[in-house]
Image (tube, rainbow, N blue to C red):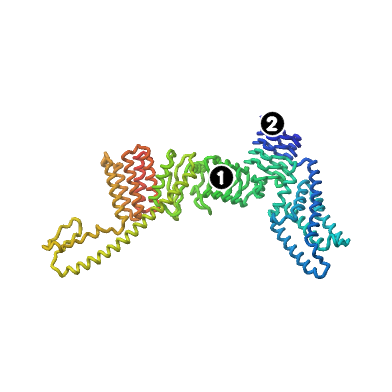
Amino acid sequence: MPQDFSGQNLRGRSFKGQDLTGANFSRADIQGANFTNARLIGANFSHTQAGLQRLWVIGLLIVSFILSAISGFVSVVMGASDIDYMDPLVPKYITASINVLVMLAVLLAVLIRQSKEETLRIVTIPSAVVIASGFLHQSAVAGAVAFLFAVVVPVIVAGAVVVAGAYESADLGDFLFSVAINLSSGYIAWRALAGDKNSASIRKPAVAFAAIGGTSFRGANLTNANFTQARLKSTDLRRATTTQTCWSKVELLDRARTGDTILIDPIVRDLLVTGQGRNKRYGGRNLKGANLAGADLADANLTEADISGATLESACLERANLTKIQALGANFHQTILTGACLESWNIDSTTQLEGAICEYVYLLSNQRERRPSSGEFAPGEFSKLFQEVLNTVDLIFRSGIDWKAFTYSFNKLILDNEGTELSIQSIENKGDGVVVVRVNAPPEADKAKIHYEFNQTYQVELKVQAAKYQAQLEAKDEQIIIYRQQSADMMLIANQLAARPVNVEVKATAESKSMNESTDQSRKLQIGDVGRDFHASGAALNLGEISGTVTNTINQLPDSPQPEQPGFKELLVQLQKSIEAEPELKLEDKAEALEQVKVLAEAGQNPREGKMQKLAGTAIKILKGTVTVLPSTATLVKACSELLPAIAKLLGLA
């Protein structure tokens, strides 16, 4: 049973390394308590008071005042050693002194603006101590005292020395230098206290100093812990596990040591504390494991943010931009997603979509590709739609598909992933040359690996196919040159023979009979059938060969037992003729489509074999994809819409 410490005084108590899962610490005083490496999963720390005990506050304040004074006076000494050699009271040094002071002013201005770590050696100590003193006490008194010791007192002392005439110890230049350095320290401290990002290098050690002896959650497991309205000043959270930890309305979280948790980002920290992110930008932010339950993120931009493992239960993401967001294992139960853009968002089987509230979404930016195209999702329809997406791998082609390269790559993918059930679910033409092939894959499959392997093979095969096409074009050009040369030679020979009494046998076709032969056989000339010796397109010859092979394969199938009812063989014959007759289809696409008809014919010879069924299913998907690029009025589109379902049914794929 979880332990109950609610309302108790637990100051300085050690819980180091203990298992306190589900324990109740609500409204307890845990100042100075030690929870280092403790197991605090689901623990309740709401309304608790963390931080430093009073004795630690007093001790650190005394130390900070001493350090303030020392650091301030050190700056005076530094000033004396730096510019003691120039005395502005001596006329010949006046110009040089002015120049030095101007340069110093410029340097300090740049230093204050940029706050580079390497240039903060002079002012870091007094500034950090001033900030730490302010952190150590709720009021501004401590900070004011530290400022007095670090800035004002050293300046007064330096001035007094000058007025007293201690020329050897300090001159006017020393005084001015000390004033500049110490006032700069105070100014930078003030900016760092206000949260200026350029002064983070000073604020960080100040926060660390002020947390010495405070409440420690270092290395603790705070998964699902609740810190609602807790006060966490001077608290150590370094290396803590903060997955789905609730930070709602926490006070002074910016004064805790956050380490490398997501709380280190002030923008993220503000969102976790306030829950108010409407119309704000969180692009690329690390929100991994964040507790955003009930947060208002309507119209927010979370492009490329990482919310993996986060909970957004009952949050409002209406019209939010979730483009390329990482949402593996995220919880969207009761989350409002109506009108959100989900372009290329990354979800998996652990993403909780059940119970999400959604009327419609957009799959592309600028409110494109609305789903559903009209109307609204029925209850549960949104989660069902994307649950199917979770079990698929999307192969996106932005410049159309080379089907020959695709077929080779997909078949290789199946062979390389033997034992993993892969099949084509759908092929969608998105317009502008963009085609999406959705591949079914089991939930446990490594989808990133499948996607990578296919793309690698496809890109290589594209180059192979491109080389083949180029070779065909070069061969065609070469054949045209040869043809023209042959034609010129034939004309020359014909002109030479025209005046001689010879009989010329011309074979116009393979079936033509010989003409009268001359008695002088040595002068007999045969002109071959150019139409058969030369083909202007190598692709035409290939298409004829492919068509003949397809016909032979189809003819091996049995005829329909019912002449009036077309069977599998007759349907394939119709499909083959429709492909060959389609004028809108490119020659290479025709060749690929006929190859798929051949696959179907081979599958028809053994329709119940699992491997052949899988290949047949892929062939049908490719044929459907092939016609997506054709006008809707094309004859082949209509033929495929009628023939392919019937063929699939006869193969047992319907």
Where is residue 560, by image quadrant?
A: top left
Compare residues 175 and 201 and report the one nearer the observer: 175
So how many labels did they put on this image? 2
With respect to residue 436, does 92 lie above or below? below
With respect to residue 462, does 86 lie above or below? below
Residue projecting furthest to the left: 519
Figure quadrant of the N terminus: top right
Figure quadrant of the C terminus: top left
- Specify the amino acid type for callout 2: Gln
Identify the element where label 2 is drawn.
loop
Residue 365 lies, in percent from the top left, at 53, 53
- Number of other residues with Cα within 10 Å of mark 2, as a class: few under 14, some 14 to 19, many 20 or more: few
- Specify the amino acid type for callout 1: Ala
Residue 216 lies, in percent from the top left, at 71, 40
- Number of other residues with Cα within 10 Å of mark 1, as a class: few under 14, some 14 to 19, many 20 or more: many
Identify the element where label 1 is drawn.
loop
Residue 483 lies, in percent from the top left, at 27, 62
Where is residue 516, by image quadrant?
A: bottom left
Identify the residue position indicated by label 2 in the image.
3
Q: CA distance from mark 2 to mark 1?
A: 34 Å
Whether residue 38 is visible, yes or no, is: yes
Identify the residue position indicated by label 1 in the image.
327
Residue beneath the point at 81% across and 61% down: 174
Res. 211 mark: none
- Relative side of 590 to 519, left or right: right
Mark closest to the chain's N terminus, 2 or 1: 2
Whether residue 42 is visible, yes or no, is: no
